[in-house]
Amino acid sequence: MDKILEDCKLSMEKALSSLDKELLKVRTGRASTTILEGIRVDYYGTPTPINQVASLSVPDARTIFITPFEKKLLSDIERAIQKADIGIQPNNDGNILRLPIPQLSEERRKEIAKSIKKIGEDSKVSLRKARQDSNNVVKKLNKDKEINEDDVKSFMKNIQDITDSYVKKVEEKVIKKEKEILTL
């Protein structure tokens, strides 16, 4: 029976982990190599993450340096960044790419805050699905006469308590990220 609760927690941890990854990708106005994570470069016919074909560094709060391991990849990386439309125009000096991170306008910050809320809502949907899956397992056990009605109520209350705690964690993370965006 504890396996049901453990599986529920595991599913919710995955949703929380996914939220963390998505929030890291959100551009905050500060230089961070995480904004490049979803971008792939054609490396000998294989789409490859930038960090596997180049060295990434953040020398200051407003700049990212990309130094390719092979010079011929410089223009490919530049095109991939432009194609990704992340709102940053790379500067190519022939050896490295410099990504100057522009200041975010108030309007752009509000748009980003909205997208953060949507990411949070998507995570809550994942949590609710995990709750529903766990509740369905409990109901099936009751239907198969493996547990009684009192156990069903107890399990469902425990599952709801777990869900509530994870929803609270999602809300805290979303609020923290929104504040980070809006107070730059």
Image (spheres, helix red, strand yellow):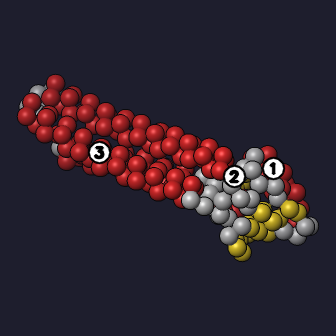
Asked whether residue 114 appears in the rendered view, the answer is yes
Direction front: furthest residue: 106
> Label 1 crowding class (10 Å Cα cut-off): few <14, some 14-19, many 20+?
some
Q: Is residue 99 left or right of residue 30?
A: right
Q: Mark 2 points at which residue?
A: 105
Considering only vertical position in the picture, is 66 above or below 154? below
Q: x, y (%) of residue 57? A: 71, 71
> Label 2 crowding class (10 Å Cα cut-off): few <14, some 14-19, many 20+?
few
| Foreground tag (1 vs 2) | 2
Q: Which residue is at the front of the view, 156 or 122?
A: 122
User: Which image quarter holds the C terminus?
Assistant: bottom right
Q: Place residue 147 in its image quadrant.
A: top left
Dot 1 falls on a residue whose secondary structure is: helix
Amino acid type at circle 3 is Asp
- Looking at the rendered structure, which numbered label has been put on residue 82? 1
Q: How far apart are marks 2 and 3 (CA)?
A: 35 Å
Direction bottom: furthest residue: 59
Considering only vertical position in the picture, is 126 above or below 182? above
